[in-house]
Structures are given as C-alpha cells and as structure tokens.
Image (cartoon, grey):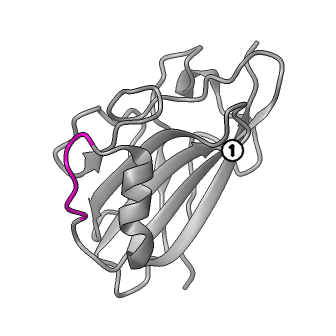
Amino acid sequence: MTLRLLSTSFDHGASIPAKFTCEGANLSPAFEWPGAPAQTKSFMLLCLDPDAPSGTFHHWAAYNIPADCTGLKEGVKRRDSRFTQAVNDFGEGGYSGPCPPKGRLHHYHFRLSALSVGVLALPKSASCTQVMKAAEAFVIETAELIGLYARR
C-alpha cells in the first residue's frame, strides 16, 4: 500500500476554505493518512508555499507524530502533547495558514513524510527548515496534498 495524504477540509487541487487562512480563524485543516509503510516510527507534516515572493515560505512543521497516529483533527492547538511543532516563517510556533499578498493565487503543499526514526531531537525553538533538514535522512515515503488560495 502507498502512503496517501487526504483531507476532509479540502480536496487536492481545490481552494482552501478561508477558515484555514489568515482571513478566517487560521485553523489547521483536518488530515488523514492511510497506507503508512510498516517500518514507520513517526511522521512529519509540513505546509509550504513555494509561490511566496521571497522563495518558499514555511507555514507549518509538525513532527514526532507517533507512528500509530493516522491523522490530525481540524484546529490542532499550538501546544499538542502528542507531537512537536516548529517555529514557522511568521515566527510563531505551530500552524499559521495561507496569507499570500493580494492578487495572486498560491499553491500550498501539505507534505506528509513517514520517518524511520521515532524522535527528531531538536530544540523547542527549531524552525521548519531545521526540522526538514533533520528529517531528510530518515524519510521512508512522502505523500502530498496541494491546496490553492488567493487573498480577496
């Protein structure tokens, strides 16, 4: 079975509802992931905006998600005892939703990676980029879901 990333909040290639953005409640979307490889020890979930004017913008990195976890509910709290969340490019810990400059459609890549290590030992102040780099050598398989958003 192949790892997949699904959301009940929006479909792949569809618009992300405003409640998951800076123009709404800024909640994290709901996700589920069937098909995890048997050797998975943990998961990492990212949200990246490669269309940002200054280069890829990191909205979220949730990591050390236990291997027996098969998804996340909508509205993950900034401090969730089940896993760790990095400092995003807004300078905040946890999820900060799409907030592109007005007038241009952006593609938000939600990327789930199954990792062969249970814990990435990083400081609480780790950035999304630091988490991605630390996880690089442990990625077994990755699945991606892309949502679209443009500010009104």
Q: In the picture provided, is 95 more to the left or to the right than 109?
A: left
> Which image quarter: residue 50?
top right
Q: Is residue 112 above or below residue 24?
A: below
Q: For mark 1, what is the residue?
A: 50
Q: Is residue 121 above or below residue 38?
A: above
Q: Main secondary structure of the magenta part?
A: loop
Q: In the picture provided, is 115 more to the left or to the right than 151?
A: left
- Extreme-left residue of the structure: 81
Q: Determine the residue positioned at 47% across, 57% down.
A: 32
Q: Determine the residue positioned at 64% across, 28% down.
A: 17
- The stretch of residues the image draws in magenta is 120-125
Residue 70 appearing in the image: no
- Asked if residue 122 lies in the magenta stretch, the reply is yes
Return the x and y of residue 19 as percentages of the image width and height: 55, 22
Few, some or many residues within 10 Å of mark 1 (<14, 14–19, 20+): some
Residue 103 appearing in the image: yes
Q: Amino acid at mark 1?
A: Pro
* Camera-nearest residue between 92 and 20: 92
Q: Is residue 93 above or below residue 56?
A: above
